[in-house]
Image (cartoon, helix red, strand yellow):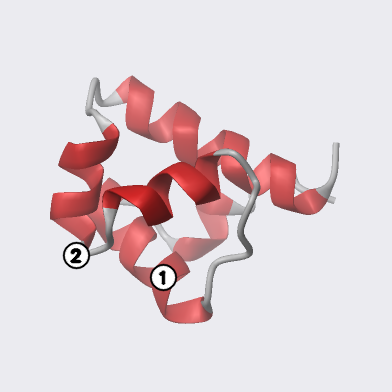
Amino acid sequence: MTPLEGFASNVRRLRLERKWSQDALAHRCSVSVSAIARVERAAHTPAFMTIVELARGLGVSPSELWEGVA
């Protein structure tokens, strides 16, 4: 698994743990639904501020999104 895939997996896992749709997460983060989908598919390397917004929306620190990623 690549680091980007690990990051994507963490974002998806945290979103699903909260039982949120991609749309709900996008709304909480002020990020487009298509951006959430690209991140979760590891089809896009998110910008730093997108990572910060994803973390805020999920209620975790940015470092938690990288947990277990080598």
42, 12: nearer the viewer: 42
Instruction: Name the element at disc 2.
Output: loop
Q: Quadrant of residue 37?
A: top left
Q: Is residue 59 above or below residue 20?
A: below
Q: Is residue 46 above or below residue 54?
A: below
Residue plotted at (51% across, 78% down): 48
Q: Residue furthest front?
A: 34
Where residue 2 appears, as percent x and y from the top left, is 84, 46
Residue plotted at (24% across, 54% down): 57
Please name the residue that numbered disc 2 is placed on.
Answer: 30
The amino acid sitting under disc 2 is Ser
Please give the count of numbered marks on the rendered protein. Answer: 2
The local crowd at label 2, few if under 14, some if 14 to 19, many if 20 or more residues have their Cα within 10 Å, is: few
Instruction: Name the element at disc 1.
Output: helix
Q: Is residue 33 above or below residue 50?
A: above
Please name the residue that numbered disc 1 is placed on.
Answer: 50
Give the mark nearer the N terminus: 1 vs 2.
Answer: 2
Q: CA distance from mark 1 to mark 2?
A: 9 Å
Where residue 25 appears, as percent x and y from the top left, is 24, 44
